Amino acid sequence: MPIHLNIAAIILLAHLSSTTLQAQPQFMVQDVGNRSIQTSAYFLLISPDGRSNALGDVGAATSPDLFSAHHNPAKIAFLDKKWGVAYSHTPWMRDLTREMFFSYLTAYHKIDKLQTIGIDLKYFNAGNLEIADVQGNTVYMLMPREFALSLQYARKLSNTFSVAIAARYIQSNLAPDVFLTNHYDNGNAYAATVDLACYYQKNFEVAGHTWYFNSGMNISNVGTKMKYSQNGKEDFVPANLRLGLALTGQIDFFNKITIALDANKLLVPTPPIVDNQGQIILGVNPNQVTVMNSLVSSFNDAPGGSKEELQEIMIGVGVEYWYNDMFAARLGYCSENPNKGNRRYISLGVGTRYEFISLDVAYLFSQSPNNPLAETMKVSLGIQFNKPLNLKAKNQNNHEEEPTQEETIEEDEELIEGEN
């Protein structure tokens, strides 16, 4: 029986086709001008918080905050409160539908001065999508949902450097019990991934002013592939390398400004160029590449050579101003090559911190067509509990000075014992 899809269903099924719910080989590309990389569970890369979005999706090396687990879990080791929890909600494709959204919930707990554990939940709701016949009668209702649950462990190796590891379970329920490729499949897929991250921070004096230099790296979503149908191919999840730098200048006791830069590169195969029969004429067959091999080969597998490899790097830059560590204003820009997705937007935002509550708001102005976050406002709320774990070392940028390790550990143990 012929079916009629509403526009939201068409968008969803286009996504399903990119995740091998069909029998055709994945990554088949005819248009050499459109070279975007297709993966499953792309919601894993959605930036969840208002601060990062206002800074152009920058977060690998900015000062630690409650949403650090997404951008760089090693940063949570430098959070100065014992507990914290945060939540954000992001409308998705708001110009097409009111039903799609992305939600993020995260929390952390400091075991002691050196060790911190965290947990977060990402949830993507694509709405309820109707498949109708030519008379407009609903013949099927799709309810696609995806979520990922992660656990993080971060540890300071010194007063300036930390590392972290995270483990993640991913479940994608795109089209349960849908008739596909002449047989029924449940349309569900599962994966397990890990993140490896590090973070460095250092302060120095120039002309009587204090400056803070931060750098960070996060290799995320490295793990198993996802398979939606029995006869389909396995898809890569969006393994990603994020590198970041940030420089903060303490203008005076009340004012400081930060300039931050992030670069992101997917660590999955670049789609090959194929002929009309589906035969590869340039590039490699991604279905024959293992996850571990792709971590290295993804830097040198693009059919267009080094030029195309450079096009796969997404750049974000942001500027943040703080007054008295209470009010912030932010400006950012995120740029992705037109051949690799063409997500480009200017972002503005504000933030406030008062006592144990933080609130951040961002608004995105799309510079490219069909951006799912176009004209989107993102709001994130956070709460932290108990006194800072290192009162003497706390400074205006949420960094630590450099007391001896014995002094800081002794202070923190006394605080923890007192709170318990």
Image (cartoon, rainbow, N blue to C red):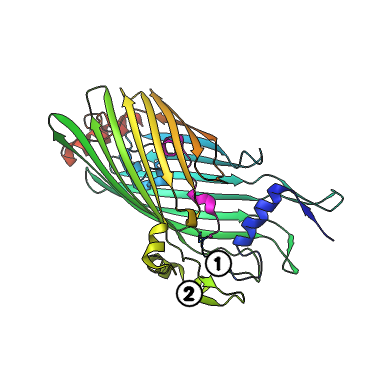
Is residue 47 on the magenta stretch?
yes
Q: Is residue 230 left or right of residue 118?
A: right
Residue type highlighted by circle 1: Phe
Tell me residue 150's x, y (percent): 47, 49
Q: Is residue 395 magenta?
A: no
Could you give the CA–CA distance between mark 1 and mark 2, rounded to whole angstroms?
13 Å
Relative side of 391 to 64, left or right: left
Is residue 66 at least partly visible in the picture?
A: no
Q: Which residue is mark 2?
A: 282
Q: Which range of residues does the magenta coloring cover?
A: 38-55
The relative height of residue 101 versus residue 307 in the rendered view (above or below) is above
Residue at coordinates 36% horizontally, 32% vertically from top-left? 420
Q: Residue at x 83, y 53 (%)?
A: 133
Give the x, y percent position of residue 251.
Answer: 22, 27
Residue 313 drawn at (x, y percent)? 40, 55
Of 123 and 49, nearer the camera is 49
Disc number placed over residue 27 in the picture, else none: 1
Determine the residue positioned at 48% across, 41% down: 48
The N terminus appears in which quarter of the rendering?
bottom right
Identify which residue is drawn at 56% across, 64% down.
Answer: 31
Q: In the rendered view, would you say 219 is above or below 72?
A: below
Q: Which mark is residue 221?
A: none
